[in-house]
Image (spheres, grey):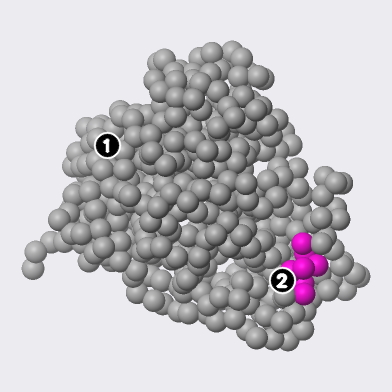
Amino acid sequence: MKDLIMYLGIDLGTSGVKVILLNDNDTIIGQTSASLDVSRPKVLWSEQDPQDWWNATNEAIASLKLEHGADLKKVKAIGLSGQMHGATLLDEHNNVIRPAILWNDGRSQQQCIELETSEKNSRQITGNMAMPGFTAPKIAWLRAHEKNNFSKIAKVLLPKDYLRFLMTGDFASDMSDSAGTLWLDVGKRQWSAEMLAATGLSEKHMPTLFEGTEITGFLSDDVANQWGMARVAVVAGGGDNAAGAAGIGVTKPKQAFLSLGTSGVYFVANESYQPNPDSAVHTFCHCIPKLWHQMSVILSAASCLTWVTQLTGFKDETSLLAEVEQLDFSKPSELIFLPYLSGERTPHNNPDAKGIFIGLTHTTGAAELCRAVLEGVAFAFADGQQALIAAGTEIDQVSVIGGGSKSALWGEILASVLNKPLTYRAGGEVGPAFGAARLAKAAISNDSFADVFNEGEIINVIKPNKIMQKYYQKQHLKFQQIYQNVKALF
C-alpha cells in the first residue's frame, strides 16, 4: 500500500501553539500543543514575547516528533494559522524591538479616533471601523508614546508570520490575516498606501502578500533538520478565523461558524466584498482566493470559562461544567454575567467595558457562577448575531469550532439563545490548525478547492431547547439593558 502524503498545520493561538499532522485522506494522524502566557503590565495592555511563540512551536514539534517521527518525514507542505492583529516589530537586523502588542490590547482607543480623522476614507478603504484590536492603531500608539521604538521599525509582522520568518527567512503574509491590520485595501486585496502613511509607515515595512493557498517559501535547512523533515513548502495560510473556516468547510455564502476560543467569533462566508463598518462588524478577505467574510467578535469567550474555573478553585473546566450540568435548566437563573473581561468589540467597540455579575445572593455557588458565564457569553454572541443581520448578512447553517466546542451543555445554551441549530464537525476542536493543514494541501495537490475544503463529517447537531429558548429571549433583553445602564460607569 502506498504511503499517504502528510501535511503539517501550525496554529499560533493566544493560550498555546497547536500542531497537527493531516494525511491525504483528511485524517488527523497526530496532534500536540504547548501553552503560552499573556503579560498584562498595565490596565488594558496585553502582550507576549515572540520568542515564547517560537519556543512553544519547537516544543510542540519535538513532542510530535517523539510519536510520529516517521510521519514527519512524509510531510510535503506546512500551513500556518494564528491569532490576528498582533504587532510584532523587527529592527533592521531582524531583532524583536519590544513585546508584541496583542489583539485583545485596548490601549489605542484615542489613536483609532485620530486615524479616522486623519484618513477620512479609512472605513471605505479597509471595510472596517478602526478599533484598538487592529494592528495600525497599535503602531500609532507606539509612534505617540514610544518614539524610540517606533523609529527602529523595519518590519511589522503578524504573529504567525514571525514564525514563518524564523522557519523560512521570508517576510510574507496572507490576505485574511493582513485584512485585520487596518492597512489592507480589503476590496482590492492589496496594501493601502494611504492607511500606511496615516501611521508613518510605507509598503517597505510590510511583508509580501499572498493568497492563503500559495507557497511563500521553504523550510530552512536548520529548521528542517531540527524538526526531522525535508525542506518542504511553507504555505501562506490564514488568520485563525479564516483558517478555522477552511478546516470545517465554511466557504460558501451564508455558511457560518461560532468559534469558542480565547475570544469568540461569529463568522459568515461571502462570495463578494460586502462591507458595513458602522455596525462594528468586520469585513475581511477569506484565506481562499476570491472569497471574503464578515465577523462579529467578542473579546472573551472560553477565556471567561477558564477565569471562573480558577476563581472558584476547580482543578479544570470539565470538573466545574459537571457541577453546572446538575442545575435545573427548566427555569432561568437569577444571575446575569457581562463577559467583558477584556473590553468588547462587536457591537459596542468599548475597550473600557468590564465584566459584571448581577444577582448575587448568599446562596450563589460556583455552579451558578459558571452557568451565568456560559449564558453571558451566549448573550454576547446574540448581540453579534443581531449586528451581522442588521448589516445585511444572511446566515444559513452554523457550525461550532474551538476548545469550548467540547461542552454539549454550552452548545445547547448557545443554540437556544441564538435560535439556531449548531453543527459539530470532525476537526472542529482543532479548527485553525486543521484549516492550516488543508491550506497546505491545497497549495501542492491537484485536488480542487471544493474537494480540499469539504464540509467534513457531521459529529453532532444540537438543536435549541424550547423551554430555555423562551426564557433566554427575556434574559437577553435584560442583559442588553444592564450594559446600557452601567456603561457610563466604566
Residue 119 visible to the viewer:
yes
Residue 18 visible to the viewer:
no
216 to the left or right of 271: left
The verdict on residue 6 being magenta is no
> How many residues crowd mark 2 within 10 Å: few (<14), some (14–19), many (20+)?
many
Residue segment shown in magenta: 474-480
Circle 2: element type: helix
Circle 1: element type: strand
What amino acid type is highlighted by mark number 1?
Answer: Thr
Q: Classify 473 as above or below 485.
A: below
Location of the C terminus (image quadrant): top right
Residue 350 screen position, x and y as percent: 72, 45
What amino acid type is highlighted by mark number 2?
Answer: Arg
Q: Dot 1 corresponds to which residue? A: 216
The residues tagged by marks 2 and 1 sit, at their Cα atoms, a distance apart of: 45 Å
Q: Classify 214 as above or below 364.
A: above
Name the residue located 51 percent from the left edge and 74 percent from the top edge.
Answer: 422
Name the residue located 15 percent from the left edge and 56 percent from the top edge.
Answer: 446
266 to the left or right of 291: right
Name the residue located 60 percent from the left edge and 37 percent from the top edge.
Answer: 130
Q: Classify 292 as above or below 105.
A: below
Name the residue located 53 percent from the left edge and 54 percent from the top edge.
Answer: 295
Q: Dot 2 corresponds to which residue? A: 371
Q: Which mark is residue 364?
A: none
Name the N-terminal-most of marks 2 and 1. Answer: 1
Foreground residue, 354 or 291? 291
Residue 22 screen position, x and y as percent: 28, 59
Q: Main structural element of the magenta stretch: helix, strand or loop?
A: helix
> How many residues crowd mark 1 within 10 Å: few (<14), some (14–19), many (20+)?
many
Given this view, does label 2 or label 1 mark the residue nearer the observer? 1
